Image (tube, grey):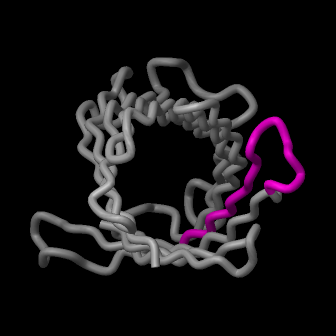
Amino acid sequence: MTFELTGGLTNNIALGVMLLTAERPSGPALEYAGWRILPHFYAPKSRKLPVDLGFVAEFGFQKTTYEEDSRHVELRPIIGKQVGKVEIDFNPVFERALHGPGVRDGWGFEPAARFAYEMNERFTPSLEYYGSTGPLPAGVPLDKQTHQIYPGGDVKLGKRLRLNVGVGVGVTGTGSRLIYKSRVEYDF
C-alpha cells in the first residue's frame, strides 16, 4: 500500500512524497518498505501546445526485504491529449537501479498508456497498459517481457474525492497474471 502526498509549488511544478508499505505472510499487517520523492514539471497551458507535456522524476529508496535494489530512479515523460470526452496519455518510462544488483542491467524501458472516455460527470471508463521490455537497447525476448492490460475507470465520489479501480490481466508468462488495483484521490 502506498500513500502519496503531492502539492503544487507553482502552477507548473509540484512535489510528491510517497510512503511505501508492504505485507508479508509471516509479518504484521503492514510494514514500512521505503519512500520515494517525485518532482513534477508541466508545460504551461498558455503555450497552447498540440499535446499536454509533463515530466516526473521518481527517486525511490526501498528496503531490500521488498526489492533487491535499495535505490532507483524513474524518468517519466508525460504526453497527453484530450479531444472532447476522449483522453489519451502515453508515458515512455525509463528506469534504472542506482544501488544493488540491478545496477549492472542499465536502463530499462517501461511504457505505459491510458485511453479513457468521460461518459458523464461521475464515471470515466478507461483501458490502461503497463509494460516492461527489459534493459535497453535490445530488451529481452517477448516471452520474458511483462505486458498488462487494465480495464477500469474513475468514479467521482464527491466534489474532491475520486476512486480509480481496475483489474489487470497479464498477457505474457512473466509478471502477475491477474492484478487488482485501486487508488483513492482527495484534492485539498
25 is within the stretch colored magenta: no
Quarter holding residue 152: top left
**Residue in the picture at 20% in, 75% down:** 30
Q: Residue at x 45, y 61 (%)?
A: 68
Q: Residue 4 lies in what quarter of the image?
A: bottom left
Camera-side residue of 34 and 150: 150
Q: Is residue 101 left or right of residue 76?
A: left
Residue at coordinates 32% horizontally, 62% vertically from top-left? 184
Q: Classify residue 70 as left or right of residue 11.
A: left
Provide residue 93's location: percent of width, then percent of height: 65, 45
Asked if residue 35 shows in the view, the reply is no
Q: Position of residue 19 (x, y in %)?
A: 41, 77
Give the image location of residue 101, x and y in percent: 56, 58
Tell me if residue 21 comes above or below residue 178 in the rendering. below
Name the quadrant of the N terminus.
Answer: bottom left
Q: Residue at x 20, y 67 (%)?
A: 23
Q: Position of residue 41 (x, y in %)?
A: 75, 64
Question: Magenta segment range?
Answer: 45-60
Q: Nearer the viewer, residue 120 or 29?
A: 120
Compared to residue 93, the image places residue 54 above or below, namely below
